[in-house]
Amino acid sequence: MENHDTQSGAAFDPQEFVANLVHRPGVYRMYDEDRNLIYVGKAKDLKKRGTSHFSGLAKERTTMALVE
């Protein structure tokens, strides 16, 4: 299943997304393919958290289920 940006409808590119994150604290949201909010998280470093989610090395099943 292909992921799309919730606003533009363009295909989601995890590498581009992570490249644009900043090394600052913040809150992030994950949506399903129907644009329903499925997760809200917080991070001390958004870039590190985003990298861990989309690197393919995430070990927790719940994390993998969210980013697939």
Image: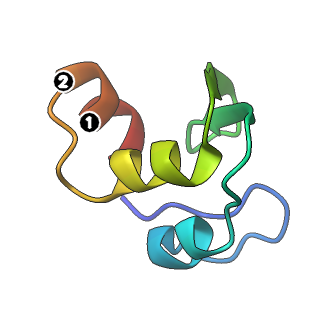
As drawn, is 22 to the left or to the right of 66? right
Q: How is the image coloured?
A: rainbow
User: Could you tell me the amino acid type at mark 2?
Assistant: Arg
Of 6 and 21, nearer the camera is 21
Q: Position of residue 63 (x, y in %)?
A: 32, 29
User: Could you tell me the amino acid type at mark 1?
Assistant: Met
Relative height, residue 57 to residue 17 (above, below):
above
Pointer 1: what residue?
A: 64
Asked if residue 12 can be seen in this view, the reply is: no
Residue ID at (70%, 39%): 35
Q: Which mark is residue 61?
A: 2
Q: Position of residue 49 (x, y in %)?
A: 48, 42
Asked if residue 64 can be seen in this view, the reply is: yes
Q: Position of residue 26 (x, y in %)?
A: 76, 34
Q: Quadrant of residue 46?
A: top right
Residue ID at (63%, 36%): 31
Which secondary structure, mark 1?
helix
